[in-house]
Image: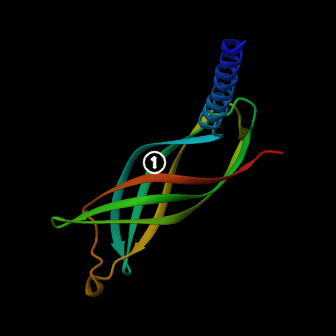
Amino acid sequence: MNTLARYKKILVMLIVFTCLAVAASAIDSEARTIDCKMNGSIAGPVRDGKQLIIFDAIFRNVSQVEYIARVNWVEVSVHGYFSGREETYSRKVKVDWDFSPALGPGRQKGLKIKFWRKVQPRRGSFPYDDVEVQVRNINFKRAS
């Protein structure tokens, strides 16, 4: 009788542990809706105290059922190089791109995104010779 109670406790503990493990893995494996792959970035010309930064990205719908109507903005990490020095910062870049038709499951679209950064040599902000851009966060709208 004593051994049967001990086995029941072990069995209950195993069941609880298994349920917790399944719940934790379900949260980790939760699918995202949109993914972004970078194709490259360019540090463009300086005009009126601003430098043009251009990057190419492929936005892919990784959802199984959702459609994406629009990309509003992206949060990027910019790593710039100038005269042997480096600078890293993050910022929000407005994209405002409507997919027509909506980006369906498994579909992808390449976009060329441009933004300007201020160049102020007096304050230590110099024009980049080369730049790397990474997308950290994507704000988008699902199709209704």
Which of the 4 image quadrants contains residue 104? top right
User: Which residue: 37% across, 75% down?
Assistant: 47
Q: Residue at the far bottom: name it.
A: 122
The quadrant in which the C terminus is found is top right
Q: Considering only vertical position in the picture, is 9 above or below 75?
A: above
- Most foreground residue, 64 or 26: 26
Which of the 4 image quadrants contains residue 43? bottom left
The quadrant in which the N terminus is found is top right
How packed is label 1: few (under 14 Cα within 10 Å), some, or many (20 or more)?
A: some
Residue indicated by mark 1: 56
Q: In this view, does 74 lie to the left or right of 44?
A: right
Location of residue 31 in the rendering, given as x and y in whole percent from the top left corner: 64, 35
User: Which residue: 30% across, 77% down?
Assistant: 125
Image mark count:
1
Q: Considering only vertical position in the picture, is 134 above or below 60?
A: below
Q: Is residue 16 left or right of residue 136?
A: right
